């Protein structure tokens, strides 16, 4: 089957959508409007959601600038932090970039001293412009999305702006499903995700196995789309996050990989830490119930044997098969354990012991007397926060025992 290619006419085949064609041609489903605008006067329908097999589409060529925007920046130094909003590179006083493996969206912040005489920058940073933004650390593309928040600080001698941006996927994190259908039957999580994400024109990417079908899943019209997908993903041993291009990514925890190296308390880059372990975030047992109309309620229990006191939690699940109910219970337990066991340590470098930028979903060995891991323990990096400030470049690593994402019994260094 011919692939949609910029500059080459494309004939629509059954099952095609403009977003799917745009994803083929540009690697970005959200660019469907470019194809629509180039063809809307010649298509049979004036509805972009309705194209017909046999219609011939003009696929616009990619301008040189557009073709460069989703690759790493050449010529940047290892300690360069770059933010580009609508093709304008910002000059800032301080900035951060947060990459995570299970929150659905990445984020960045920047503080700039603003010169009102720069008319282009004034337009670029206007509130509610939702302008495209890209963040690079050491020349490597980290986040692709939009500028969402503009804070304006007016002082007698200075005007500054506090900016916050997020991956395109934050729209899925924030949005509910406005229109039916709210129920899906005999579908895979991939089919559900593609159906729910289609209106956002955001590609859905799967790494690894999709998993089996769900008998029936129901999303409440007031439920956030990401929360719903994350709940289903738990039952398929998947995590939902964002790629550096702003795509919605379903992936698995990289728990079987070798550590990228080790860091030891008191030696660079690990000199300080302030963390808290909260026992109230965990329960002794997690009971999941599911009831299908006309059938008996199904239940499953997952226990956290590392909690020595009586604490219980009951959750409902959409899935209807007994095996999946047990998996839902196991993943609810894992999520609670992940939240309670995650801790953060600051490091004095952007780069890990392997010489590469710190990366989420990788294994790191940590040694610390004060954190009760004197002999070292292998943690999974759950998120990385890169900081660029006048004092230099630092990062914050959120760490968690790897087993919290596998459904296995968690190997905790703090349990005797």
Image (tube, rainbow, N blue to C red):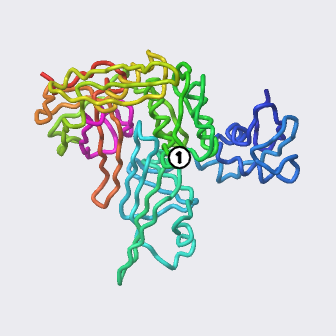
| Residue found at the very far top of the displayed protein | 323
- The total of numbered circles placed on residues is 1
Q: Which picture quadrant has residue 311?
A: top left
Of residues 148 and 384, which is closer to you in this image? 148
Q: Characterize the magenta stretch by its predominant secondary structure.
A: loop
Q: Is residue 36 magenta?
A: no
Instruction: Judge whether residue 255 can be spotted in this image.
Output: no
Q: Which residues are magenta?
A: 338-362
Question: In the drawing, does residue 52 fall left or right of residue 404?
Answer: right
Return the residue at label 1: 176
Residue 219 appears left or right of 333: right
Res 151 seen here = yes
* Placement of 178 over or under 186, stated as above or below: below
Binning the other alpha carbons within 10 Å of mark 1 as few (below 14), some (14 to 19) or many (20 upward) gives some
In this rendering, position of residue 100 left or right of residue 276: right
Q: What residue is rendered at 88% in x and 35% in y?
A: 54
> Splitting the image into 4 quarters, where does residue 181 fall?
top right
Residue 348, image x and y in percent?
26, 46
| Quarter of the image that includes the N terminus | top right
Q: Residue at x 64, y 47 (%)?
A: 30
Which residue is outermost to the bottom? 156
Residue 342 magenta-highlighted: yes
Q: Is residue 156 above or below residue 305?
A: below
Work out whether residue 324 or residue 370 is closer to the camera in this orientation and state it: 324
Residue 146 screen position, x and y as percent: 53, 55
* Residue beneath the point at 48% across and 28% down: 318
Image coordinates for residue 142, horizontal then vertical, percent: 47, 45
Q: Residue 388: image x %, image y %?
A: 35, 55
User: Which quadrant would the C terminus be assigned to in this image?
Assistant: top left
The residue shown at (19%, 23%) is 306
Instruction: Kindly state the secondary structure of the residue where label 1 is placed.
Output: loop
């Amino acid at each position: 089957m011919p692939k949609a290619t910029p500059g080459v006419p494309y004939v629509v085949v059954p099952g095609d959508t403009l977003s799917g064609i745009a994803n083929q041609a540009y690697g970005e489903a959200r660019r469907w409007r470019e194809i629509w605008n180039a063809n809307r006067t010649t298509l049979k329908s004036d509805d972009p959601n309705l194209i017909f097999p046999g219609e011939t589409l003009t696929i616009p060529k990619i301008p040189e600038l557009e073709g460069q925007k989703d690759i790493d920046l050449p010529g940047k130094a290892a300690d360069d932090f770059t933010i580009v909003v609508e093709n304008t590179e910002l000059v800032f006083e301080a900035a951060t970039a947060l990459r995570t493996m299970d929150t659905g969206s990445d984020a960045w912040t920047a503080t700039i001293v603003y010169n009102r005489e720069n008319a282009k920058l004034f337009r670029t940073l206007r509130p509610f412009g939702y302008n495209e933004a890209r963040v690079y650390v050491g020349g490597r593309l980290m986040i692709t999305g939009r500028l969402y928040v503009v804070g304006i600080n007016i002082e007698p001698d200075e005007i500054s702006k506090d900016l916050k941006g997020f991956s395109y996927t934050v729209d899925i994190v924030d949005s509910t499903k406005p229109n039916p259908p709210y129920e899906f039957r005999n579908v895979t999580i991939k089919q559900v995700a593609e159906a729910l994400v289609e209106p956002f024109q955001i590609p859905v990417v799967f790494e690894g196995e999709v998993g089996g079908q769900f008998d029936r899943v129901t999303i409440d019209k007031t439920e956030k789309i990401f929360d719903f997908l994350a709940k289903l993903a738990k039952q398929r041993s998947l995590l939902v996050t964002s790629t550096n291009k702003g795509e919605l990514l379903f992936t698995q925890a990289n728990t079987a990989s070798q550590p990228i190296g080790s860091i030891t308390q008191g030696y660079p880059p690990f000199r300080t830490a302030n963390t808290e372990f909260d026992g109230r975030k965990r329960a002794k047992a997690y009971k999941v119930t599911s009831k299908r109309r006309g059938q008996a309620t199904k239940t499953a229990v997952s226990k956290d044997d590392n909690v020595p006191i009586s604490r219980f939690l009951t959750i409902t699940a959409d899935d209807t098969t007994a095996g999946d109910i047990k998996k839902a219970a196991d993943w609810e337990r894992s999520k609670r354990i992940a939240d309670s066991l995650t801790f953060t340590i600051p490091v004095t470098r952007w780069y890990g012991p392997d010489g590469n930028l710190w990366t989420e979903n990788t294994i790191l060995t940590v040694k610390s007397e004060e954190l009760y891991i004197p002999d070292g323990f292998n943690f999974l990096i759950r998120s990385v926060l890169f900081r660029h400030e006048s004092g230099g470049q630092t990062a914050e690593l959120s760490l968690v025992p790897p087993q919290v994402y596998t459904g296995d019994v968690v190997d905790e260094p703090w349990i005797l």
